[in-house]
Image (spheres, rainbow, N blue to C red):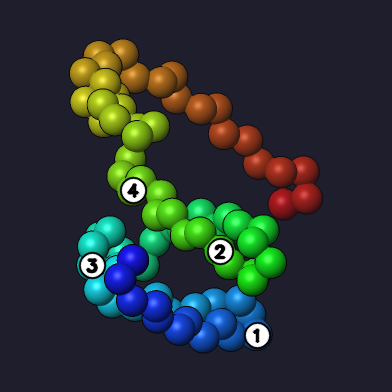
Amino acid sequence: MNTLTTVTVTRKGQAVLPLKWRKAFGLQAGGPCDARELNDGKGSLLLTPRKQGRSGASGLLEHLRAQTVSFPPVERHTLPTK
């Protein structure tokens, strides 16, 4: 980093990071970051943006659309209190 930027942290632990840094990592609208303490005696944190995107559900929609057999209808019943 060439320059240091001061970040103000609220009582709830929220902070607004510099726009230049957020644009560089695609976090203009916010997003998750990992914060690690560096233990350098100055209370420094290392912020690392997490990868965004859907990794767990890739291809799920196409798989569900390709299914030919549907679920059987659910048998409905009335509750005894009604």
Q: Which residue is label 3 attached to?
A: 23
Looking at the image, do the residues carrying marks 4 and 1 touch, with CB atoms under 8 Å apart?
A: no
Q: Amino acid at mark 2?
A: Leu
Label 4's element? loop
Marks 3 and 4, the one that precedes in the sequence: 3
Is residue 15 shown left or right of residue 51?
A: right
Frontmost residue, 68 versus 23: 23
Alpha carbon of mark 4 to alpha carbon of mark 2: how far? 21 Å
Label 2's element? strand
Q: In the orientation shown, which residue stands out farthest toward the top? A: 69
Label 1's element? loop
Kindly identify which numbered label has been placed on residue 11.
Answer: 1
Q: Which residue is label 4 attached to?
A: 52
Kindly identify which numbered label has been placed on residue 45.
Answer: 2
Residue at image coords 31%, 45%? 53
Q: Can you give x and y, in whole percent of width and height, for residue 51 in the image?
A: 35, 46
Looking at the image, do the residues carrying marks 3 and 4 touch, with CB atoms under 8 Å apart?
A: no
Marks 4 and 1, the one that precedes in the sequence: 1
